[in-house]
Image (cartoon, rainbow, N blue to C red):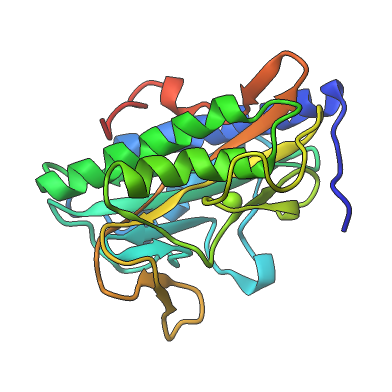
């Protein structure tokens, strides 16, 4: 599949999907607390997304039953919302996809549930920082490896955590997963050349321990293999002539800095 570049008008449409996503993320931020189940969060998200005339991109995707992915603690990604009840001291990764007028926006962040341990605080801070460090790399003339390197260097060389290798970011547009794949590791100046109109879901997934992961019996949830805590932060980012544009700026919303 070739990389599908977007016109400025199409990027505006994706930004409109991103705006609904950011409001959904803020809604969940206000609901995340000890005693809440991940199913309750899923239902609140689905209700809100549909109330905006949009659809949850994940629902039914390859048979996925949820509207969001909700992945606590050592679960990296793809958690099916359900009976799991949040506890004080948990971390919870929430991944949301919104389809508006046929265009997809995709974003994630990991929330603290009440006060969390120092190592969990560091994990959330470092993973979020790595995403922010990737943003300025998303400019025409750079390469995919510049994005991956910015993330990997911060996470592994500077902070001693591990980038998950087997899960990567992706192009996004009318389809949730488009080319190219966007690894969270790499060498500067290597890989696909970035061009105006590309839209990328950049999504560092980081384990406190080793990088290996395992698939759970439900065939969806992915855990760190060593059981260490994991975090996931994601933006949909457009590569434009004016520079990188974050189409899902949940960090600018009310409560957006709760993880810091
Ligand atoms: Mg994604």
Quarter of the view holding residue 239: top right
Q: Give the camera-side residue of 157 and 163.
A: 157
Q: Give x and y (percent) for residue 108.
A: 47, 44
Please state, as top left, top right, bottom left or bottom right, where the N terminus lies in the image.
bottom right
Q: Give the camera-side residue of 152 and 19.
A: 152
How many badges with numbers are in the image? 0
Please state, as top left, top right, bottom left or bottom right, where the C terminus lies in the image.
top left
- 204 over 26 or under it: above or below: below
Quarter of the view holding residue 62: bottom right
Residue, x 13% and y 51% (percent of image)? 89
Q: Can residue 54 be seen at all in this image of the molecule?
A: no
Relative side of 40 to 229, left or right: right
Relative side of 173 to 66, left or right: right
Q: Give x and y (percent) for residue 11.
A: 77, 27
Residue, x 52% and y 47% (percent of image)? 203
Relative side of 95 to 159, left or right: right
Residue, x 31% and y 67% (percent of image)? 210
Q: Give the camera-side residue of 51 and 94.
A: 94
Q: Can residue 235 be seen at all in this image of the molecule?
A: yes
Q: Give the camera-side residue of 203 and 70.
A: 203
Q: Give x and y (percent) for residue 172.
A: 72, 45
Extreme-bottom residue of the structure: 217
Relative side of 186 to 233, left or right: right
Residue, x 80% and y 43% (percent of image)? 102
Extreme-top residue of the structure: 242
Q: Give x and y (percent) for residue 29.
A: 34, 37
């Amino acid at each position: 599949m070739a990389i599908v570049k977007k016109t400025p008008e199409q990027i505006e449409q994706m930004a409109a999907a991103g705006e609904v996503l950011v409001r959904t993320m803020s809604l969940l931020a206000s609901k995340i607390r000890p005693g809440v189940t991940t199913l309750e969060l899923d239902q609140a998200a689905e209700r809100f997304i549909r109330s905006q005339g949009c659809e949850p991109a994940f629902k039914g995707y390859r048979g996925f039953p949820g509207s969001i992915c909700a992945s606590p603690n050592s679960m990296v990604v793809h958690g099916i919302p359900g009976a799991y009840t949040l506890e004080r001291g948990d971390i919870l990764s929430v991944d949301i996809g919104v389809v508006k007028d046929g265009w997809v926006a995709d974003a994630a962040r990991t929330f603290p549930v009440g006060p969390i341990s120092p190592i969990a605080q560091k994990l959330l801070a470092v993973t979020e920082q790595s995403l922010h460090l990737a943003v300025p790399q998303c400019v025409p003339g750079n390469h995919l490896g510049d994005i991956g390197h910015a993330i990997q260097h911060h996470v592994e060389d500077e902070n001693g955590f591990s980038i998950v290798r087997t899960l990567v970011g992706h192009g996004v547009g009318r389809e949730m997963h488009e080319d190219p794949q966007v690894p969270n590791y790499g060498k500067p100046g290597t890989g696909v050349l970035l061009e105006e109109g590309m839209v990328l879901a950049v999504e560092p997934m980081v384990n406190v321990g080793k990088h290996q992961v395992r698939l759970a019996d439900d065939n969806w949830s992915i855990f760190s293999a060593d059981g260490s805590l994991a975090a996931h932060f994601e933006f949909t980012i457009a590569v434009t002539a004016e520079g990188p544009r974050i189409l899902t700026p949940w960090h600018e919303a009310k409560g957006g800095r709760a993880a810091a």
